[in-house]
Image (cartoon, rainbow, N blue to C red):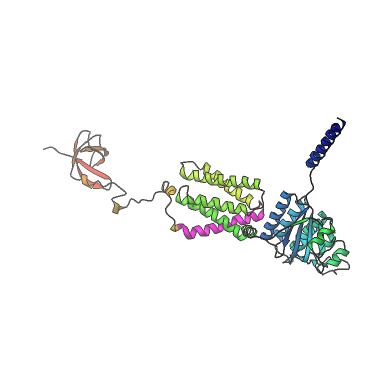
């Protein structure tokens, strides 16, 4: 019995150990996601970083490495990448493999940690053109990025403004650029590493699993959609499609094209999926309202509301800033040119046909600007009213306005038409023999 009792206790303890061990979370290997920027920074690169960073956040990755080898690129694209890097909760590491110049330097400074490969360099971020306005704006962006990630803001500013200089590394009048050794000396970088694995070793992540993201066709497509020229063309096609729909006077392909272009415009934006859904709903509702105005005898309420919704949704799709206004204005201008070229070749509008007069009442078609009364000459009738000298007579079964040839003619007097001058019928009394 005692042995059975001991065996039972042992079984219970074993079961408890197995149960609780199974219930405890098991630490999976750390995963680090790496995205590579190895060409000019543009909208496609922005789309790549956005996609990769979103995947890292969704997967709960331990760290996010931005591998940089670029001479620079579009400042607005670099600013978008900087904003994404500074807003994420995942630790970010910039790894400069060769060069992080100009806009690339801004991205490197925007990461919480910075590591450089042997022989690499960072800086040389003077804007082109180097106007006072551009320098002041970009210098402020560099300073803010460095401050947010615990780096020296004055050092960052010297990369943009050559009038500042940086003692020991750049005289006044020279743009600051640092080698990997110099960056480590001034405490800009955390160290030098020859590989991604060495970078991870600096942060005790040597056993982490590395997942890499490269530029793909979808990133390039998203980059194309974010191009200013393409966005102007998309807006122009939207307005052109809506005008064609009005010209055709019904709900058809025009509205479908407008909605499709709106989807492409929205796909190239920076909004979250929830904001995108709201803007899409507003845009589609506006297009539907315009369609309702075309096919119903409304008083303009649906049409006005639809136009406001379409313009409002487009404004927010484009970023709700000054650039959005420029793109809208450019799209309207291009649409006006397109419609001027194609408008005469479009079929006549069923909608406009209902509110405009197209037929002409010409003499060749039997119409005249005045009634022809010459047929009354010589015919007889009787006065209905006294003519003094004008009044009304009856000729056959017709009542005719007439004028007496001389003095007044009494009521119920037989008359004869002696002359017609335009619409003026002249009569005289019939003298009975």
Q: Is residue 327 above or below residue 385?
A: below
Assign the C terminus to one quadrant of the image. top left
- In the image, 33 versus 71, the foreground residue is 33
Tell me the residue at 55%/52% (across/down).
260
Q: How many numbered marks appear?
A: 0
Asked if residue 327 lies in the magenta stretch, the reply is: yes
The x, y position of residue 201, in whole percent, is: 83, 59
Residue 165 at least partly seen: no
- In the image, 80 versus 345, the foreground residue is 80
- The rendered magenta stretch, by its main secondary structure, is classed as helix
Tell me the residue at 54%/53% (across/down).
239
Tell me the magenta residue range.
318-343
Asked if residue 98 lies in the magenta stretch, the reply is: no
Tell me the residue at 54%/45% (across/down).
304
Q: Is residue 86 above or below residue 67?
A: above
The x, y position of residue 218, in whole percent, is: 63, 58
Residue 27 at least partly seen: yes
Find the residue positioned furthest to the left: 433
């Amino acid at each position: 019995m005692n042995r059975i009792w001991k065996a039972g206790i042992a079984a219970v303890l074993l079961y408890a150990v197995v149960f609780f061990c199974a219930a405890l979370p098991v630490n999976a290997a750390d995963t680090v996601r790496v995205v590579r920027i190895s060409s000019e920074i543009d909208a496609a690169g922005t789309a790549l970083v956005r996609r990769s960073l979103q995947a890292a956040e969704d997967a709960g990755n331990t760290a996010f490495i931005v591998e940089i080898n670029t001479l620079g690129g579009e400042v607005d694209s670099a600013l978008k990448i900087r904003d994404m890097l500074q807003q994420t909760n995942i630790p970010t590491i910039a790894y400069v493999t060769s060069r992080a110049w100009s806009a690339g330097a801004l991205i490197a400074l925007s990461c919480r940690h910075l590591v450089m490969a042997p022989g690499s360099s960072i800086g040389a971020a003077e804007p082109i053109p180097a106007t006072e306005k551009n320098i002041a704006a970009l210098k402020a962006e560099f300073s803010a990025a460095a401050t947010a990630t615990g780096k020296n803001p004055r050092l960052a500013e010297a990369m943009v403004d050559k009038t500042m200089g940086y003692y020991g590394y750049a005289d006044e009048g020279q743009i600051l650029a640092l080698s990997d050794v110099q960056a480590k000396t001034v405490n800009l970088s955390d160290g030098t590493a020859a590989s991604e694995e060495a970078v991870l070793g600096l942060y005790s992540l040597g056993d982490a699993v590395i997942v890499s993201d490269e530029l793909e066709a979808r990133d390039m497509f998203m980059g194309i959609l974010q191009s200013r020229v393409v966005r102007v063309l998309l807006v122009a096609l939207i307005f052109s499609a809506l005008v064609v729909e009005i010209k055709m006077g019904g709900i058809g392909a025009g509205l479908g094209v407008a909605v499709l272009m709106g989807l492409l415009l929205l796909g190239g934006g920076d909004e979250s999926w929830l904001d995108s859904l709201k803007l899409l709903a507003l845009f589609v509702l506006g297009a539907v309202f315009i369609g309702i105005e075309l096919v119903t005898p409304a008083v303009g309420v649906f049409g006005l509301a639809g136009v406001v919704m379409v313009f409002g949704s487009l404004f927010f799709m484009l970023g709700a800033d000054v650039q959005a206004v420029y793109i809208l204005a450019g799209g309207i201008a291009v649409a006006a040119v397109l419609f001027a070229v194609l408008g005469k070749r479009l079929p006549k509008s069923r909608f406009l046909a209902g509110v405009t007069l197209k037929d002409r009442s010409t003499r060749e078609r039997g119409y005249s600007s005045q009634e022809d009364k010459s047929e009354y000459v010589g015919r007889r009738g009787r006065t209905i009213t006294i003519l003094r000298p004008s009044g009304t007579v009856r000729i056959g079964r017709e009542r005719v306005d007439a004028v007496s040839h001389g003095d007044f003619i009494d009521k119920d007097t037989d008359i004869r038409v002696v002359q017609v001058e335009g619409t003026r019928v002249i009569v005289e009394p019939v003298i009975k023999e």
